[in-house]
Amino acid sequence: MPPFTVLHVCMGNICRSPMAERLLALAVRERMARRGLDPAGGDDLLHSHSAGTGGWHAGEEMNPPAARQVTTRGGDVGGFAARKLRSEHIDAADLVLTATADQQEYVLALRPDAAERTFVLGEFGRLLGSVDTAGLPPGEATPEAVYARGVALVAAAHAGRRGTAVLPTDDLDDPWGRGDQCFSRVADEIEETVQPLAAALLP
């Protein structure tokens, strides 16, 4: 039940999935502000968190260039600590967004029953464009309404991908150990999905 919970998954949980976690939360707060509501109230509507398929960096802060991308775009990196993905994280998520198709397979190996709500991030972004949002529950700024709309949105996206395959271009490049320009490009690609997702949840 509410809030609508989105789990982001990458490999080490210090670059791609933390950026996606915090940039989605930022996008929801910005939608709240556009409605003239307290942006902090977005945290009651959506829970955005992340984990990695490996535990090498457990307890670490976000990789510095990843943190720079979040903060320069207006997001918050406070309180972040990397962690290894566990089955219960998947069980509690209404939507699982992975950085790559390999990580999607990892999630489904842990929890095959999560297939209908697990997507590669770029794949979900593509599918969002074909969802008829007029057929979703009303877009009110309450935890119950956002939850209902989010669950219906995920179901519609899953229905839209039947008979299709994940594309190589749906994967996010791993920017670890690369420069700020690479991190900026990956953050841009993340925003191409999380901003439309926030807009769909809070039209």
Image: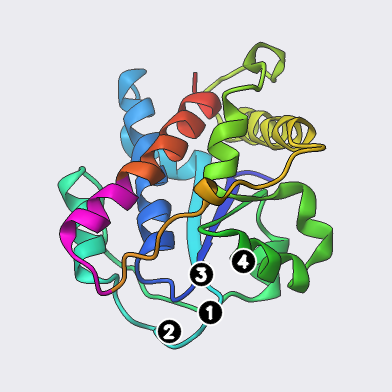
Q: Earlier in the sequence, mark 3 or mark 4?
A: 3
Q: Main secondary structure of the magenta part?
A: helix
* Residue tagged 4: 102
Q: Is residue 41 left or right of residue 91?
A: left
Q: Which one is earlier in the sequence, the residue at label 3 or at label 2?
A: 3
Give SS at disc 4: helix
Say if mark 3 contacts mark 2, CB within 8 Å: no
Give the alpha-carbon distance from disc 4 to disc 2, as whole Å.
20 Å
Give the side of residue 114 with respect to residue 104, left or right: right
Dot 4: few (<14), some (14–19), or many (≥20) neighbours within 10 Å?
Answer: few
Magenta stretch encompasses residue 186: yes
Where does the image place residue 188, in percent across and percent down from the top left?
31, 42
| Residue assigned mark 1 | 84
In the image, farthest residue toward the front:
168
Depicted 59 relative to depicted 161: above or below: below
Q: CA distance from mark 3 to mark 2?
A: 9 Å
Q: Dot 3: few (<14), some (14–19), or many (≥20) neighbours within 10 Å? A: many
| Alpha carbon distance from label 1 to label 3 | 5 Å
Q: Position of residue 5 (x, y in %)?
A: 59, 50
Instruction: State yes or no: discs 1 and 2 in contact (Cβ < 8 Å).
Output: yes
Instruction: Report the residue marked by disc 3.
Output: 51
**What range is drawn magenta here?**
177-187
* Residue 33, horizontal then vertical, whole percent: 30, 25
Q: Nearer the viewer, residue 86 or 99?
A: 99
Amino acid type at circle 1 is Lys
Is residue 143 on the magenta stretch? no
Which residue reaches farthest bottom? Answer: 56
Numbered disc in front, either 3 or 4: 4
